[in-house]
Amino acid sequence: MKIIFHSRYSCYSRFKIRSSEDYLSYQHESKIIMFTRILVALDGSEISRLAFTRAIEFAKEDSAELHAVVVVNSPHIWKDDSPANQTKSEADAKTLLDEIEARTKEANLKFVPHLVSGHPGDRIVSIADEIDADLIVIGSLGKSHLDRLLLGSVSSYVTQYSKRNIIVIRN
């Protein structure tokens, strides 16, 4: 598993983060990074669940408020058989959010769910701006260059267009 930390602040780019443990130890030792609102993007895939697990770890470290966004893809934007379309209906999305909410209650964290529709990358960026998120945690399937060109990549879109700190979890 790889974690890529994208930051708009140069002081973070000097530290090479190889794992979530490195990141947490860097955060703990320096106390430069302090997150109050963390947004995690979920689509029901295994990698997004791993991203959620990491987001819980980050939220516990700073007692941060955890926001989860599930984007129900519009059929006009994504085909139903697209790998990016893990969450197929609003009912599936609500079930996913209920499951995630139960896990955050176990961790004693404040949880705010967001169920939206539209283009996943655009909606993740806009929700992060609306809530003034300090960090976005998102999973990436590690698509090839050709797949990204043809299908697009939500994590690539978010890292390109968001001005927030971003951690990309890769398998």
Image (cartoon, grey):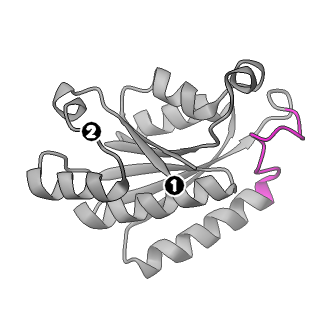
Specify few, some or many for label 1: CA neighbours under 10 Å numbering under 14, 14-19, or 20 or more.
many
Q: Earlier in the sequence, mark 1 or mark 2?
A: 2
Above or below, 70 against 77 in this view is below
Answer yes or no: is residue 36 visible: no
Query: In the image, is 122 to the left or to the right of 94?
Result: left
Identify residue type, mark 1: Ala
- The dominant secondary structure in magenta is loop
Element type at mark 1: helix
Where is mark 2, residue-wise? 16
Give the amino acid type for the residue marked by disc 2 in the picture: Lys
Residue 8 horizontal side relative to residue 106, left or right: left
In this view, 165 is above or below 65:
above
Q: Nearer the viewer, residue 18 or 99?
A: 18
Q: Please give the residue where the numbered disc 1 appears in the rendered image.
A: 51
State the image coordinates of residue 60 (x, y, percent, origin top left): 31, 67
Q: At which x and y percent is residue 64?
A: 30, 59
Helix, strand or loop status at disc 2: loop
Marker disc for residue 73: none
> Which residues, given as a range, are shown in magenta?
79-91
Residue at x 83%, y 37% (from the top left corner) = 82
On whether residue 89 falls in the magenta region, the answer is yes
Res 120 quadrant in image: top right
Image depth: mark 1 or mark 2 in front: 2
Q: Is residue 51 magenta?
A: no
Q: Residue furthest bottom?
A: 106
- Quarter occupied by residue 118: top right
